[in-house]
Structure formats: structure tokens, C-alpha cells
Image (cartoon, grey):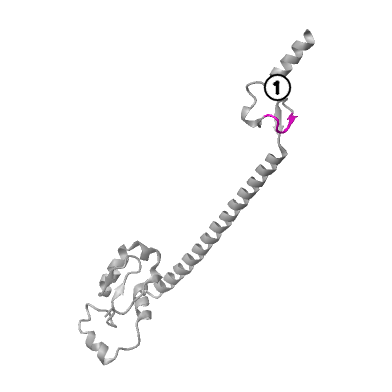
Amino acid sequence: DQAAIEQIHSVKRHTAPHSAPHSAPPRGEGIPTTDFGGEIHHANPVREAERAHAEHLQTEELLKRKAERVAISAARAKAARAEKDACMELAAQNVSPVAVLLKIASPPPATSQERELDVIPQIMDDAGRTIPCENCGRVFVHVGAMKAHLRTCAYHLLHPARISIKPPRM
């Protein structure tokens, strides 16, 4: 009798409610193994291999994403540094970045026919061209209006080097 009671108590200890019921696979699967705590776990080699493979793939994917993020942020930092250096160089020369870009983008001296189109110099820029904003698409025919717009246009605050001057559409 005493041996039977001991056996029942040991079985109750192994199948106590504190042992995780979700860790046991359906009946008939796996090899029952005992860890140091005395709890019974059913180890299924196929499931363990699948789980390990899935974890490996997930880890690999996370590392790949992290590498992409690091590369993108490094490229952004390099571009920002180059842009900052260009602005600092212009500031050292006491020149407005907008004025320099307008000067760079302006064409060779205008012909007499182009000078006729440039009758109202306050409305058109030096070459008689309109200036579109690449961020919002607004078209400016006055350089002062474009400069005022640049102060409020968030895209150009971040990317001052992306101002382009295009000829007016006919």
C-alpha cells in the first residue's frame, strides 16, 4: 500500500497544474524527457528543428533589415554633411545659397529676341524664366517671391540644393 501511495504522489508531482499544459504535443508524439525540475516535457525532434529554422530565418531577416537601415542612415548623414559643408562655404563668402544657385542655373547672355520678352524685369528673373518649386509645384515668376517661399517651404529648408529653374511653358 505504501509503495502505491508513493507512486501516486510522484505521478501527481510530475503532472502538477504548475507544469505548462501548452508545452505538451498531442498524444502519441514525441519522446518524454525529464529536466532537472522533474517536469515531463515531450520533445519532438521535427518540431524542434522547424522552430530552430524559423528562428534562424527570423534572425537573419532582422539582421538584414538592420543593415539596410544603417546603410540608409549613413548615406543620409553623408549627404547632410556635404550639404552643410557647401552652405558653410557659401556663408564664409557672405553669399546667399539661393542667389548662387540662380546664378549657376542661368543661361548664357540673352539674345535680342529674349530681351524683348524680358520687358518687366521685376516679374521675371534675369533670363525671363519662371521658377517652379519642386516640392509643392507652385510656379514663381518673381525671384523675391521664390525666396520668400523658400523660407516657408519645409522641403527646401531640408534640401536647399534642389532648386531648379525651368523655362516658361509656351
Q: Is 52 placed left or right of 116 in the picture?
A: right
Which residue corresponds to mark 1?
Answer: 14
Magenta span: 27-35
Q: Residue at x 37, y 76 (%)?
A: 101
Please state which of residues 168 and 96 is positioned toward the viewer in this rendering: 168
Q: Is residue 33 magenta?
A: yes
- Quadrant location, the N terminus: top right
Establish if 48 lies above or below 166.
above
Q: Is residue 24 magenta?
A: no
Q: On the image, which quarter does residue 166 sit in?
A: bottom left
Please state which of residues 7 and 163 is positioned toward the viewer in this rendering: 7
Q: Amino acid at mark 1?
A: His
Please state which of residues 148 and 1 is positioned toward the viewer in this rendering: 1
Q: Position of residue 74 (x, y in %)?
A: 53, 62
Q: Position of residue 37 (x, y in %)?
A: 72, 26
Q: Residue at x 31, y 72 (%)?
A: 132
Q: Residue at x 38, y 68 (%)?
A: 160
Please state which of residues 170 and 158 is positioned toward the viewer in this rendering: 170
- Quadrant location, the C terminus: bottom left
Q: Position of residue 144 (x, y in %)?
A: 26, 72
